[in-house]
Image (spheres, grey):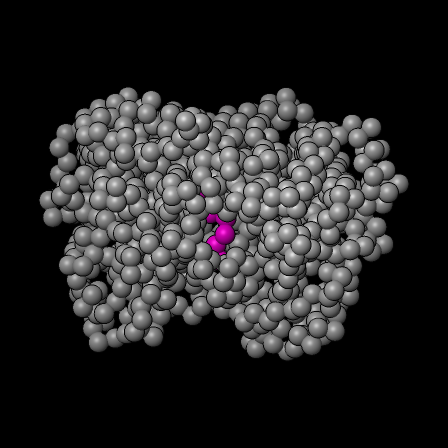
């Protein structure tokens, strides 16, 4: 019996102690006629040897294509110690640290993680994780509505340069509470949000403005001007940031004159594998004045009865297990193990390492864009500074190109046609420190020959 | 001298020295970047600067300050802390799955999609539901999806006045919090004295404003809701839908299915029932299953069959969907772990989970009653968990459930869930799970009995516990009043 230690003698003795004739008798409170005897639809058991073979077969069928897509999830080198440590049973199989004395390891990791997120974002306080970047944006919108004491509108301006899937997620999660997420247009030359688009809302009651840096197109927004303009509207500022880019870019806490109020985003680039889409790591940080409106678990440093330093979950009166229907969010389980991995990752890289990764991303991305646009048929769409992604305009529809590239073992980018039809045949590409000059050459040659063939046809 | 294992581990920032680094982890230097200065930060972020060995040693030592399933019996009620098989982790981390970008074309993900499709089918079979979406990233997000679907269903019928969700007083806090997040009003329902839903109170709560009811069965008191068929009949007759909180699904796997009880929507905590890791507080996965009438509203994406292969179905395929809840497709790596677990157990293994978790709970309950402890629901059969009330001990010895919990840590056992459900005074909610041996359960009975004796002879010893862990009880009031949420050199 997989994972069940009982011998026949154990069962007999235990039933005797209970005073039951059989294990079936233990289910005698289930109304008769309601039960099932079998589970058709669940196949018979496999041994560990058999499931291993099956899983390896399926995993290898998916191959390991050369990856040039980002669009919210980024391939980075993950130091070997990160997952060797994070999958230690003491981290992997522990519960939420409600019994603080028996969970000082997890709690101290949370405190260190919060410290690192605060350092990256330039804000005072971080929580100990949310599910992912998209749901973190949704929670940030809900938090802004609670935190803004004067605004009554629950209107949040969200530029169309913000990740389109995240915008949809934010809408799905906040709709029930009556939030109104309104789009802001982008400038066709720079691919960024124009301050005039914000200024057009002067005199209105706007609760918050979302600013993503770098934005979904990989372009750098003028975060200082946008933050100032948002403040002029009396709105709070929600920053969406890439934590690797923050090694180089101005932290949200220093944007504009007063900084953003909330920063959130996807911390997957910090040591978390692409893993076909998850589990990832939503982060969120804020200024001390709003900390009681922040959702999610927070660890605090305190002292024990003997006066020694120790860690505990704090500000729990915000949370569902205490406040129930009046909690800041329903979030309970979060992404503890990924938070642990990110903390180890950041410790191994340090400021110098993370900066070097970010610089390498910029360099590789420039090299990629230069290589792909060297021949006819592909051009960059936007001018202005970028981080590690770029929008390319193709002469031909993107989908068949990506399909053909996939056949050659290349994931060539993300087709923007569905979300941004106004861009025409537009492709979002990405290169990080993991792409070599040879990788980039492979992609450039494949694309060139595909585009040549398309032109000839 | 302080025991080496109890020595305080410095904050990693205290180990930091300017210029030190784990050099092997850095990419080669790149040419100077071209980002204009006004976009850039003025100084590097204040991250720790340590060597690779320092980091490895630091996090290894921190891990050793945790209780975990791999090291201890962890009878935390309603959390299903069972063994997390190592193979589930190993196979989910195979490079083909792990290195795959979520936006890579479906043709390069047929192996993954096959696994996830099978998982959807198996969860549908186990719960008795017509359709499953794997996308919710935790139980609470599964609850959100469920209540959002109930809301969408009523709205889709033009039934706009249904804005109340009925929640029993014994429910998890996530239930009312979820109802609020979905813009619903919470209507609380008192439990009857034997733990079952009070049908008269239910009738009083039902109205044309009822959107639905959220129930856990077996309930959080650890007993099976015997009136469930009648509850379902009355809620449906009033026009409401039934939501099943899957927290306690472990108790009934392969024995009785929520769909057959009359539930319209369910979430499954894969990190409980299907043994994916709790990870020190996540990641979880909260797949949702629905009956026929909620099928059009399932959150996307969902894995669909497409000719000979599989692909993600999205908003175009399910235009009435409540939408997306995650940036990609949920906690895929966790879903893979659950798939491995289900395939290893098979149909018979799943039934054994219910049988042996119930056997263990009833054995432990019987032994604790013999040892003089009071069950919260006398005369009721335990499901996979049960609650004790330590009201008598608190009165006689001035020693609370919290004191018992902390003293158990000294005996090497993780504490049960305390003070939940809230309606049981001095409550310990105990869930042993099927993966624990009889010897482990016997040891736990002996520990609780010993603490009871200590409470009589030396109550201070129990009230001052724990005594053997890296820290004693922590000052939570100070933690909340003098907030120290991030390390700063000045705070040293």
Q: Is residue A162 left or right of residue A10?
A: left
The residue sitting at 31% across, 29% down in the picture is A348
**Residue B132 belongs to the span the image colors magenta:** no
From the top left corner, tell me how far across and down residue B147 is, in percent. Answer: 56, 62
Q: Is residue A50 left or right of residue A159?
A: right
The residue segment tinted magenta is: A330-336
The residue sitting at 71% across, 55% down in the picture is B376
From the top left corner, tell me how far across and down residue B24 is, in percent. Answer: 28, 21
From the top left corner, tell me how far across and down residue B371 is, in percent. Answer: 75, 43
Would residue B467 be seen by someone viewing this image from the given angle?
A: yes
The residue sitting at 20% across, 73% down in the picture is A202
The residue sitting at 16% across, 57% down in the picture is A256
The answer to which of A368 and B440 lies nearer the viewer is: B440
Please identify the quarter of the rendering in which residue B391 is found.
Answer: bottom right
Please identify the quarter of the rendering in which residue B367 is found.
Answer: top right
From the top left corner, tell me how far across and down residue B127 is, in percent. Answer: 69, 49
Q: Is residue A178 left or right of residue A209?
A: right
Vertical side of A410 occupied by A394: above or below: below
């Amino acid at each position: 019996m997989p994972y069940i230690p009982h011998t026949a003698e154990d069962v007999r003795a235990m039933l005797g102690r209970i005073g039951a004739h059989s294990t079936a008798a233990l289910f005698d409170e289930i109304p008769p006629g309601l039960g099932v005897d079998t589970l058709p639809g669940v196949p018979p058991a496999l041994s560990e040897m058999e499931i291993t073979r099956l899983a390896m077969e399926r995993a290898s069928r998916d191959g390991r294509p050369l990856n040039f897509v980002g669009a919210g999830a980024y391939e980075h080198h993950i130091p070997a110690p990160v997952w060797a440590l994070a999958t230690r049973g003491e981290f992997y199989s522990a519960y939420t640290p409600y019994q603080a004395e028996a969970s000082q390891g997890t709690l101290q990791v949370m405190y260190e993680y919060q410290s690192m997120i605060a350092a990256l974002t330039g804000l005072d306080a971080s929580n100990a994780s949310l599910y992912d970047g998209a749901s973190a944006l949704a929670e940030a919108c809900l938090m802004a509505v609670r935190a803004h004491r004067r605004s009554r509108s629950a209107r949040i301006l969200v530029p169309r340069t913000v990740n389109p899937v995240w915008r949809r997620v934010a809408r799905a999660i906040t709709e029930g509470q009556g939030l109104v997420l309104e789009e802001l247009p982008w400038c066709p030359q720079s691919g960024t949000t124009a301050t005039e688009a914000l200024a057009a809302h002067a005199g209105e009651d706007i609760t918050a403005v979302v600013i993503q840096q770098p934005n979904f197109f990989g372009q750098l927004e003028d975060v200082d001007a946008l933050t100032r303009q948002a403040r002029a509207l009396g709105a709070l500022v929600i920053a969406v940031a890439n934590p690797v880019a923050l090694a180089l870019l101005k932290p949200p806490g220093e944007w504009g004159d007063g900084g953003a109020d909330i920063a959130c985003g996807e911390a997957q680039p910090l040591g978390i594998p692409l893993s076909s889409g998850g589990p990832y790591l939503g982060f969120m940080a804020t200024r001390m004045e709003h900390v009681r409106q922040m959702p999610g678990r927070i660890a605090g440093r305190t002292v024990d009865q003997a006066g020694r330093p120790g860690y505990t979950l704090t500000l729990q009166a915000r949370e569902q297990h205490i406040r129930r229907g009046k909690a800041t969010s329903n979030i309970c389980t979060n992404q503890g193990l990924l938070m642990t991995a990110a903390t180890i990752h950041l410790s191994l890289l340090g400021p110098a390492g993370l900066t070097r990764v970010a610089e390498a991303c910029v360099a590789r991305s420039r090299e990629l864009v230069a290589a792909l646009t060297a021949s006819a048929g592909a051009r960059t769409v936007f001018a202005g500074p970028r981080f590690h992604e770029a929008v390319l305009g193709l002469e031909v529809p993107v989908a068949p190109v990506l399909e053909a590239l996939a056949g050659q073992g290349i994931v060539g980018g993300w087709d923007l046609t569905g979300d941004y039809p106004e861009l025409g045949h537009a492709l979002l590409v990405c290169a990080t420190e993991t792409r070599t000059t040879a990788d980039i050459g492979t992609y450039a040659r494949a694309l060139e020959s595909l585009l040549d063939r398309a032109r000839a046809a | 001298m302080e025991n080496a294992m109890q020595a305080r581990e410095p904050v990693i920032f205290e180990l930091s020295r300017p210029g030190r680094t784990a050099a092997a982890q850095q990419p080669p230097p790149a040419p100077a970047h071209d980002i204009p200065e006004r976009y850039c930060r003025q100084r590097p972020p204040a991250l720790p600067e340590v060597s690779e060995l320092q980091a490895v040693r630091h996090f290894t030592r921190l891990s050793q300050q945790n209780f975990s399933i791999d090291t201890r019996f962890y009878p935390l009620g309603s959390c299903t802390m069972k063994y997390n098989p190592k193979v589930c982790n190993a196979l989910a981390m195979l490079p083909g799955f792990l290195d795959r970008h979520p936006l890579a074309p479906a043709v390069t993900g047929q192996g993954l999609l096959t696994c996830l499709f099978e998982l959807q089918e198996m969860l549908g079979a186990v719960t008795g539901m017509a359709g499953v979406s794997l996308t919710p990233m935790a139980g609470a997000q599964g609850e959100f999806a469920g209540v959002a679907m109930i809301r969408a269903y009523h709205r889709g019928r033009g039934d706009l006045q249904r804005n109340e969700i009925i929640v029993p007083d014994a429910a998890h806090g996530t239930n009312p919090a979820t109802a609020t997040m979905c813009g619903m009003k919470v209507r609380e329902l008192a439990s009857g004295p034997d733990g079952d839903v009070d049908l008269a109170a239910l009738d009083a709560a039902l109205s044309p404003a009822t959107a639905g009811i959220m129930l856990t069965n077996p309930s959080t008191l650890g007993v099976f809701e015997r009136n469930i068929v009648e509850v379902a009949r009355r809620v449906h007759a009033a026009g409401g839908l039934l939501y099943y909180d899957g927290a306690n699904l472990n108790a009934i796997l392969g024995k009785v299915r929520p769909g057959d009880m009359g539930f319209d929507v369910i979430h499954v905590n894969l990190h409980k029932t299907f043994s994916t890791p709790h990870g020190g507080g996540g990641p979880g996965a909260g797949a949702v299953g629905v009956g026929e009438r909620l099928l059009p509203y399932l959150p996307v994406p969902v894995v669909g069959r497409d000719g000979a292969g599989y692909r993600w179905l999205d908003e175009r395929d399910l235009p009435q969907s409540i939408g997306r809840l995650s940036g990609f497709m949920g906690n895929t790596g966790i879903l893979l772990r659950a798939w491995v677990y289900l395939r290893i157990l098979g149909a018979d293994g799943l039934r054994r989970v219910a049988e042996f978790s119930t056997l263990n709970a009833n054995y432990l309950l019987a032994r604790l009653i013999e040892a003089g402890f009071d069950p919260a629901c006398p005369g009721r059969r335990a499901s996979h968990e049960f609650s004790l009330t330590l009201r008598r001990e608190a009165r006689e010895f001035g020693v609370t459930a919290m004191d018992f919990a902390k003293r158990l840590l000294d005996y090497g056992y993780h504490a049960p869930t305390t003070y939940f459900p809230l309606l049981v005074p001095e409550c310990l909610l105990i869930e042993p799970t099927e993966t624990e041996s009889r010897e482990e359960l016997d040891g736990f009975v002996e520990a609780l009995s010993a603490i009871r004796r200590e409470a009589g002879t030396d109550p201070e010893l129990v009230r001052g516990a724990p005594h053997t862990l890296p820290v004693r009880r922590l000052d939570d009031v100070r933690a909340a009043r003098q907030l120290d949420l991030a390390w700063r050199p000045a705070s040293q």
